Image (tube, grey):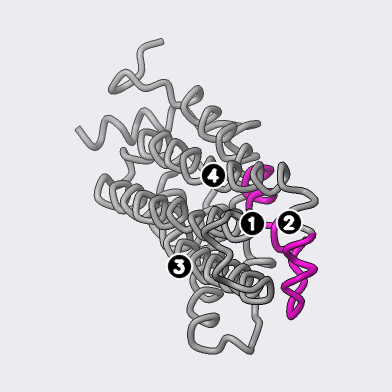
Amino acid sequence: MTFQGGINPKKTARIAGFLYLLLAPLGFFGAMYIPSITVPGNPATTVKNILAAEALFRLSIFSALATPVVTLLVALYLYRLLKPVDRSHAVLMVVFSFAAAPIAMLNELNHFAVLLLASGADYLKVFTTDQLNSLVLLALNAHHFGAFIAQLFWGLWLFPMGYLVFRSGFLPKFIGVLLLIAGFGYVADSILLFLLPDLNARFSQCTFIGELFLLLWLLIKGVDVEKWQKRAVETL
């Protein structure tokens, strides 16, 4: 079967779904492991925990670095799939994803700084142990805020994606609505953290379900090929 533009929509959808699925373990470990060994208000214990599991700490950094790379691949495959709906919105989706990636990756420098501070290198002997431990907590806190800067863009990319899915005709409208809600959750979390840090609100813990529905639909059902072809022809 010959597809418009040389794109196989079923195959593209399943690759996008598989890559999206990879983000679950990568993102969870990359984002959750290090906070799990951090003891708020106790820098000495935090440093002790990090040094006791340095290999896992480094693996968490690797996972956090791999996450935006995989997300970029997801964005590119979704662009190929959703471009027939509205090219400008598909481009915007990719732009937001590409904006988030360097922020997220550069933010991992804070975690590398943690390892350097805890290394006991000779050039650090000008600092006392308490000072070094406090600097470790500072780097961890800086990473926390940096992650929410990147999350702002991870939320924004879901708005054009949700719009495209809703308008597509070859993917369910309800998933598009859920993606818009998910985008709101991520953006709201970031804004509230910066404006009202003591509120500790996390809407995204309840609104992320749209992404789960999308990746499962892409993996299991794919797209309605006939409707996708019709859309592709209409955009010529």
Q: Pick whichever of labels 4 and 2 is earlier in the sequence.
A: 2
| Residue 114 forms part of the magenta stretch | no
Image spot of residue 87 (x, y percent): 26, 45
Asked whether, in this view, residue 228 is left or right of residue 182, the answer is: left
Q: Name the residue under label 2.
A: 50
Q: Mark 3 points at which residue?
A: 149
Name the amino acid type tagged 2.
Answer: Ile
Bin the neighbour count of mark 1 within 10 Å (Cα to Cα): few under 14, some 14-19, many 20 and up. Answer: few
Asked whether, in this view, residue 41 is left or right of residue 187, the answer is: right
Residue shown at 48% from the left, 66% from the top: 146
Q: Which mark is on residue 67?
A: 4
Image spot of residue 72 (x, y percent): 42, 41
Splitting the image into 4 quarters, where does residue 114 fall? bottom right
Image spot of residue 140 (x, y percent): 60, 67
- Whether pointer 1 and pointer 4 mark residues with C-beta atoms closer than 8 Å, the reply is no
**Separation of residues labelled 1 and 4 (CA atoms):** 30 Å
Q: Name the residue under label 1.
A: 120
Q: Quick one: SS at disc 3?
A: helix
Chief secondary structure of the magenta portion: helix
- Whether pointer 4 and pointer 3 mark residues with C-beta atoms closer than 8 Å, the reply is no
The residues colored magenta run 24-48
Q: Pick whichever of labels 1 and 4 is earlier in the sequence.
A: 4
Image spot of residue 7 (x, y percent): 36, 22
Residue shown at 63% from the left, 43% from the top: 26
- Whether pointer 4 and pointer 2 mark residues with C-beta atoms closer than 8 Å, the reply is no
| Residue 37 forms part of the magenta stretch | yes
Q: Which image quarter holds the C terminus?
A: top left
